[in-house]
Image (cartoon, helix red, strand yellow):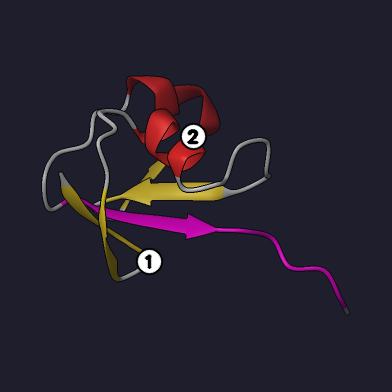
């Protein structure tokens, strides 16, 4: 299926947000996620189904000061 990750088109086979994040290399990282503009808490990622054309936003905290 085709989704958009942070504005970039990606082809994935995952059906859920959690599996997609694993496939994209975000396993174990502290991130915030949204699908189609709606925040998805980490606890809901395994139950959040993705569909062709969905827009996924992934934000990682930045260090510095």
* Nearer mark to the viewer, of 1 and 2: 1
Residue 61 position within the rendered picture, expressed as x and y whole percent measured from the top left? 69, 60
As drawn, 15 above or below 4:
above
Residue at 60%, 37% (x, y): give it. Answer: 27
Decide which of tag 1 and tag 2 comes sooner along the chain.
1
Res. 55 image quadrant: bottom left
Residue 65 horizontal side relative to residue 44, left or right: right
In the foreground, 41 or 47: 47
Residue 65 position within the rendered picture, expressed as x and y whole percent measured from the top left? 88, 79
As drawn, 10 above or below 7:
above
Residue at 25%, 36% (x, y): give it. Answer: 13
Residue at 29%, 32% (x, y): give it. Answer: 14
Graded by Cα atoms within 10 Å as few (under 14), some (14 to 19) or many (20 or more), the crowding at tag 2 reads: few
* Mark 1 secondary-structure assignment: loop
Residue 23 position within the rendered picture, expressed as x and y whole percent measured from the top left? 45, 40
- Tell which residue pokes out farthest to the bottom in this image: 65
Residue at 47%, 56% (x, y): give it. Answer: 58
> What residue span does the magenta drawing correspond to?
54-64
Residue bearing the label numbered 2: 41
* Mark 2 secondary-structure assignment: loop
Determine if the magenta segment contains residue 45: no
Residue 31 horizontal side relative to residue 62, left or right: left
Residue 4 position within the rendered picture, expressed as x and y whole percent measured from the top left? 26, 60
In the foreground, 23 or 7: 23
As drawn, 55 above or below 47:
below
Q: Where the N terminus falls, by quadrant?
A: top left
As drawn, 29 above or below 6:
above
Graded by Cα atoms within 10 Å as few (under 14), some (14 to 19) or many (20 or more), the crowding at tag 1 reads: few
Residue bearing the label numbered 1: 6
In the foreground, 7 or 38: 7
């Amino acid at each position: 299926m085709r989704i958009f990750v942070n504005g970039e088109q990606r082809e994935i086979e995952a059906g859920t947000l959690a599996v997609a994040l694993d496939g994209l290399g975000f396993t174990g990282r502290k991130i915030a996620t949204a699908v189609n503009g709606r925040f998805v808490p980490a606890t809901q990622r395994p139950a959040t189904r993705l569909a062709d054309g969905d827009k996924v936003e992934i934000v990682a905290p930045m260090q510095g000061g």
